[in-house]
Image: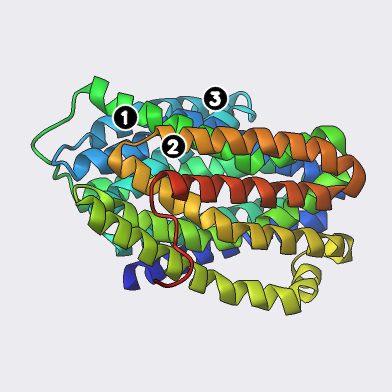
Amino acid sequence: MKATLLVTMSRLFYSGCIFLLNSFLARHLAPSDFGTYSAALVYLNLAALFLIGGCNTSHIYFYKHGQDYFWRLIKIYTAPAVFFFIIGVFFWPAAFFAAGAAAIAGISIVNADAQARENHFEFSAQLCMFGLCVLGGMIAVELLAPHGPLKSIYLYALFCAIFYFALIVVRRCISRVTLPHQPTAKAFFGYGAKSLWLNVLGQILYMGDIILLSVMLPSEDVAIYSVASMLAKSLWLIIDSMGLTLFPKLINISSFEAKHIFKKGVIQACLLCLGPAIIFLFFGRLLLRALYSDNYLSAYEPTLVLIVAAFPLIFYKLGSRLAAAREDWRAVYISLGISILANIVLNLLLVPIFGIIGSALASLLSYSMCGLYLAWSLGVMPKVGYK
């Protein structure tokens, strides 16, 4: 529990820096430009996700089995980050997008290494430094120069690359010690590929609504929904922190112990999410007005719906960690496939009628299907009632 709280607080700090950044951009960009920025951020994260290739999860899995692939991975991600960084500085600023994607992938590997060693203090410190780096650098540049949606994305990617280079130097100075054995490339990247497709399907489920809305509705509505999504996903930081701390513990233990840890994690995550949800219920409009502006007050209702959607998603977030520890991918793929199809269909049906509220309702229903089906498939669905 202490490790979860430490990681959660650092992720909340990091998220707070990103919220301040988004608040700054929302106030200085027109709603249509902020909608463009939000869509571009989705594509940047998807590009980084494919570059990661599930290697962060694979590194944790094999490290817990006494095998270390860390520095070989760092060489793989550093080369393109440096190459596109140089091109961006001297020739073409848009290359920062590619450099940032490679850097975000590398940062995830360094984070995964701290998780694998269960050094939660190091992992938390990395998140806090990253938040300060992005927030300080972006605001400084935006204040000193004309801003625009794509320029903001390039600058975000630039500071991700700078932070990655600094992180590698620090990590190299702290320790060069590695485990004596390495997994074969086939085994390592094979496991990573399975994790990658799990993550890709998950991101399609999480971000598909914004992509669909960018086609179906004006950019102003996309901007409002993006604000609602970012606020609601602050609860995901708590859930993800629980998953990050539990995953190394779920590897190499009995099925009974894993189920016990999973159920305990679900209860703790629900309790930790309940407080912020209640606070937003009563003070959400004040928060929107303070962080953004009156233009975004209409994000209150979809945010509430998406906050409710976070609770059934706990079963998926923690259940997918349990499945990865067991190498039981089939149930996760099925739950995500069903939920993505349901999300697309529900968005197409509800958005023309209810607008962004309809998209939030589609997310609520599809997340519920995803989490509850996976919990049932893994045999960890909570039983209701008493014998």
Task: Say what amino acid the circle numbered 1 marks.
Answer: Tyr
Left or right side of 72 for 347: right
Q: Name the residue tied to disc 3.
A: 87
Residue 136 seen anywhere in this rendered image of the structure: no
Taking 115 as reference, is 290 above or below it?
below
Discs 2/1, front: 2
Label 3 or label 2, whichever lies nearer to me, is 2
Left or right, 293 with respect to 84, comes to right
Q: What amino acid is at disc 3?
A: Ile
Task: From this view, report whether residue 171 is shown above or below residue 327.
Answer: below
Count residues near mark 3 (Cα–Cα under 10 Å), then give few for <14, some for 14-19, many for 20+.
Answer: some
Helix, strand or loop under label 2: helix
Label pair 3/2, CB-CB below 8 angstroms: no
The CA span between labels 2 and 1 is 16 Å
Q: Residue at x 35, y 30 (%)?
A: 192
- Judging by the rendered image, the residue that carries numbered circle 1 is 191
* Residue 143 image-quadrant placement: bottom right
Q: CA distance from mark 1 to mark 3?
A: 33 Å
Whole-percent x and y of residue 279? Answer: 66, 78
Which kind of residue does numbered mark 2 sit on? Ala
Alpha-carbon span between mark 3 and mark 2: 43 Å
The dot on residue 334 is none
Residue shown at 81%/35% (left/top)?
348
Secondary structure type for disc 3: helix
Which sits earlier in the primary sequence, circle 3 or circle 2?
A: 3
Disc 2 target residue: 331
